[in-house]
Image (cartoon, rainbow, N blue to C red):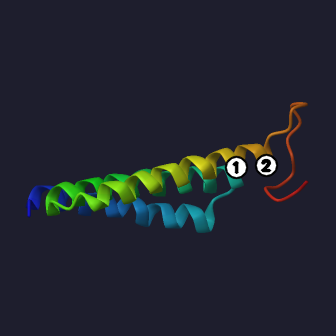
Amino acid sequence: MSPIHTIFALLLLPAIAAGMFRILKGPSTVDRMMTAQLFGTCGVAILLLLSKGMANPVLIDIALVFALLSALATITFVRRTWHPSGKKRHGFLHR
């Protein structure tokens, strides 16, 4: 087990903790979505670092699934909030 990879993985955890504050107190839906992207990116990075540090290649597959889910969440968010006429919709779940 490589301690340097584990240390770098632990250094990414405060970014996720700061993101939790932004999800709870975010002024807009877009801020919350960007924080969800931060979670996805940090989660993938942590899994890849732990995979290398623990010599466990299964974690790479899990990181790939997380990356795909993060991309799908962003696409879904944009499709639900963007209107072709250029007008903004009022709220994330408003149709």
Residue type pointed to by label 1: Thr
Residue type pointed to by label 2: Arg
Q: Is residue 25 above or below residue 73?
A: below
Crowd around label 2: few <14 · some 14–19 · many ≥20 (10 Å):
some
Side of 86 relative to 7 (left or right): right
* Disc number for residue 80: 2
Q: What is the x, y in percent for residue 29? A: 70, 55
Seen at 52% across and 66% down, the residue is 21
What is the quadrant of the C terminus in the image?
bottom right
Seen at 51% across and 67% down, the residue is 20
Side of 47 relative to 55 (left or right): right
Q: What is the x, y in percent for residue 33? A: 62, 53
Crowd around label 1: few <14 · some 14–19 · many ≥20 (10 Å):
few
Q: Quadrant of residue 60?
A: bottom left
* Disc number for residue 76: 1
Name the element at disc 2.
helix
What is the quadrant of the N terminus in the image?
bottom left
Seen at 17% across and 62% down, the residue is 6
Label 2, label 1: how many angstroms apart (C-alpha)?
6 Å
Q: What is the x, y in percent for residue 92? A: 79, 56
Q: What is the x, y in percent for residue 58? A: 29, 61
Is mark 2 in CB contact (under 8 Å) with mark 1?
yes
Residue at the farthest top position: 85
